[in-house]
Image (cartoon, helix red, strand yellow):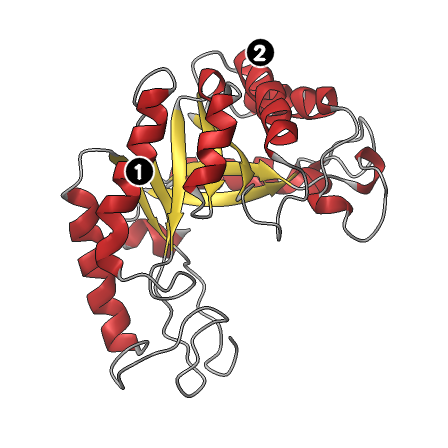
Amino acid sequence: LDLIARSGVRALRVSIGWDGVEPQDDVFDFAFWDAFMDAASRRGVRVVPYVAYTPAWAATPSDAEHWRRPPRDVAEFRELMATLARRYQSHVQSWELWNEPDNREYWLGDESTFVALLAAGAAGVREGAPDALRVFGGLAGRVDFLEATFALGAGSHVDIVNAHAYFETWNPEPMETLPRYLDEIDAVTTRHGGRKPVWLAEVGYSDHRGGAQVSHFVGARHAFEHTPPFQAAMLVRTVALALAHPSPRLFAWYELRDLPAGEA
């Protein structure tokens, strides 16, 4: 946190695991987050949390995939969000509800079960901290998923849409596709009740490559791509594209921690 503050970083997106803070029904463990919130506030770092991942006790079936399954009773998620929002209302101004629900790696439910979860979580935030912003859990890139959820009323439960962007790393489209992506998100929210601000709270470009292979979806075409110097260039290009568009209100590069060179 000292390094973050010295670097001029003013917003830090973090993951609060439901399965971590409520390992058993109505048994909470806030020790880490109490200390963390206080430490961040003392350094002037705004904590931007998302809350996700179903505990085993709340999922059906309670198997190895429990953490990405919809909870059996979304009222439990509402209770959690009310508890968190109330406890940290002096530290946190926004609550992002889940992470990449359009990605099967993180959500095994469909659009309707996600809207039910979103509605419950948003109601909990309103109960615990009425002035806090409610954020649509970071979209992995599927604007069709956003369209389907907004058609089911998701827009009435959120103030902001968070969108993730990994062009040329997880998405084969060029980085210059970012403005079109933002336009498509704006079109969805405008069609369903009014345009909403957008966060780009998870954006990145990898410096990892194995030969030409960058990820399952992307291969490098040139020797300079996906190297640390070009990663720096892509950061600047991404920021410029984001600043040139009217919708984004927050930008966060993923991630602070850099893996060892040999790890994907």
**How far from the left and from the top, in percent, is residue 80?**
67, 25
Say which residue label 1 marks: 184
The CA span between labels 1 and 2 is 32 Å
**How far from the left and from the top, in percent, is residue 239?**
21, 52
Q: Secondary structure at mark 2?
A: helix
Q: Amino acid at mark 1?
A: Glu
Task: Using residue 219 as the reference point, say whether residue 176 is left or right of it.
Answer: left
Say which residue label 2 marks: 127
Q: Is residue 212 above or below residue 107?
A: below
Q: Is any atom of residue 119 visible in this view?
A: yes
Res 72 label: none
Q: Is any atom of residue 91 visible in this view?
A: no
Q: Is the residue under label 2 in contact with that under label 1 (CB below 8 Å)?
A: no
At x 26% / y 50%, what residue is drawn?
Answer: 178
Q: Secondary structure at mark 1?
A: helix
Q: Is residue 175 above or below residue 100?
A: below
For the residue carrying disc 1, how many other residues have a C-alpha within 10 Å: few (<14), some (14-19), or many (20+)?
some
Q: Nearer the viewer, residue 53 or 38?
A: 53
